[in-house]
């Protein structure tokens, strides 16, 4: 079977990094992306013993950076078979009336527009070869609005909608798309949301066993390794202790 190449955004941490690791161990070549260069370099060195890896440093919010980065790919990495639209974060947790405009920009620009820019930059080669797989990392926040989640929830509702749009628009090009919507996953996510407040971030994952990034990475690998005629389109994944965005069975 032909070796596949995956393009993973947000590979410096959490779900994206765990996905890069499981893909590398399964001989999928990798384009790993993120803003933190030293983390990209460390991961590239670690995974190069399993597979071919290149890295791209860019901010998904900056459309020129996105398109220039994709254009700069070495020839052997230009045919992307699998795109993992994973980069994203929540910034803040407050009512709309108390919302911070910079936080709103960061979420809409990163989680929605960034995902679109990357998809648009990668799609021409997928369309040309009439094949491809796009995994969009949504969230339970894209299925349910919860108190103080407002703009983050809106950004993930948009990811859910865009995943459905991709299924429709790309159908005639044989490009599969799937949205995976996790509940609580223990990553740097809450540290970013709470602007470096490690104690507050830790409390999000205490009193129960949260999902680990590897749990989601395993599912992503399962989805992309189904036979060609099978497309899992939409998945919600919770920790056992979680019943909805707001119901958690904590000790
Ligand atoms: P992390 O904070 O651990 O990872 C986020 C990743 O996204 C990092 O690699 C970061 O890289 C990258 N990233 C963030 N903003 C940008 C940007 N502007 N440009 C480029 N890269 C960016 O969190 P997770 O692994 O948990 O998050 C991954 C995805 O999963 C996100 O879309 C998140 O919304 C979603 N999710 C997370 C859940 C959770 O509970 N953790 C639950 C449901 C969904 P760098 O900083 O190097 O740029
Ligand atoms: C991350 C999960 O519940 O904090 O998307 O929105 S939640």
Image (cartoon, rainbow, N blue to C red):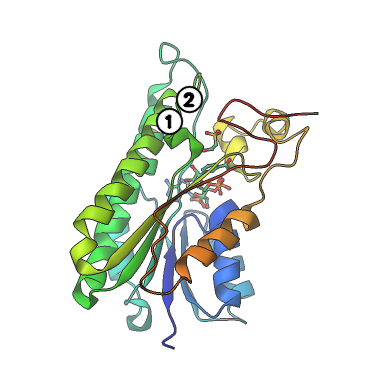
Q: Position of residue 193 (x, y in %)?
A: 55, 33
The residue lying toward the viewer, choosing from 175 and 205, is: 175
The residue lying toward the viewer, choosing from 232 and 22, is: 232
Q: Residue at x 45, y 50 (%)?
A: 87
Q: Residues within 10 Å of mark 1 (few under 14, many from 20)?
A: many
Q: Please give the label number shown on residue 30.
A: none
Q: Residues within 10 Å of mark 2 (few under 14, many from 20)?
A: many
User: Is residue 127 rendered to the left or right of residue 27?
Assistant: left
Per the model, the C-alpha gap separating discs 2 and 1 is 5 Å
Q: Residue at x 54, y 63 (%)?
A: 40
Q: Position of residue 163 (x, y in %)?
A: 33, 49
Q: Residue at x 40, y 27 (%)?
A: 151
Instruction: Establish whether ligand 2 lies closer than 8 Å to the Cβ of label 2.
Output: yes
Q: Please give the label number shown on residue 149.
A: 2
Q: Determine if residue 235 is in view.
A: yes
Quadrant position of the N terminus in the picture = bottom left
Q: Quadrant of residue 99?
A: top left
Q: Quadrant of residue 6?
A: bottom left
Q: Please give the label number shown on residue 153.
A: 1
Instruction: Establish whether ligand 2 lies closer than 8 Å to the Cβ of label 1.
Output: yes
Count of marks placed on residues: 2
Q: Position of residue 223 (x, y in %)?
A: 48, 63
Would you place residue 234 above or below residue 112 in this image? below
Would you place residue 64 above or below residue 98 in this image? below
Q: Quadrant of residue 73?
A: bottom left
């Amino acid at each position: 079977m032909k070796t596949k190449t995956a393009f993973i955004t947000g590979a410096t941490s959490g779900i994206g990094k765990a996905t890069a690791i499981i893909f590398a161990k399964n001989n999928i070549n990798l384009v790993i992306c993120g803003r933190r260069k030293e983390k990209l370099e460390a991961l590239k060195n670690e995974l190069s013993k399993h597979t071919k890896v290149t890295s791209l440093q860019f901010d998904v919010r900056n459309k020129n950076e996105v398109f220039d980065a994709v254009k700069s790919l070495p020839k052997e990495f230009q045919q992307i078979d699998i795109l993992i639209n994973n980069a994203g974060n929540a910034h803040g947790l407050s009512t709309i009336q108390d919302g911070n405009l910079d936080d709103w920009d960061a979420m809409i620009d990163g989680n929605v527009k960034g995902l679109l820019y990357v998809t648009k930059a990668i799609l021409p080669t997928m369309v040309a070869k009439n094949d491809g797989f796009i995994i969009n990392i949504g969230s339970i926040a894209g299925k349910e609005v919860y108190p103080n989640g407002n703009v983050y929830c809106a950004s993930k509702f948009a990811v859910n909608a865009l995943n459905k749009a991709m299924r429709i628009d790309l159908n005639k090009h044989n490009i599969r798309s799937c949205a995976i919507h996790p509940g609580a996953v223990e990553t740097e996510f809450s540290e970013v949301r709470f602007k470096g407040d490690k104690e507050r971030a830790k409390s999000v994952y205490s009193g129960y066993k949260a999902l680990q990034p590897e749990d989601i990475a395993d599912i992503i690998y399962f989805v992309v390794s189904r036979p060609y005629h099978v497309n899992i389109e939409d998945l919600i994944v919770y920790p056992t202790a979680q019943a909805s965005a707001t119901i958690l069975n904590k000790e």
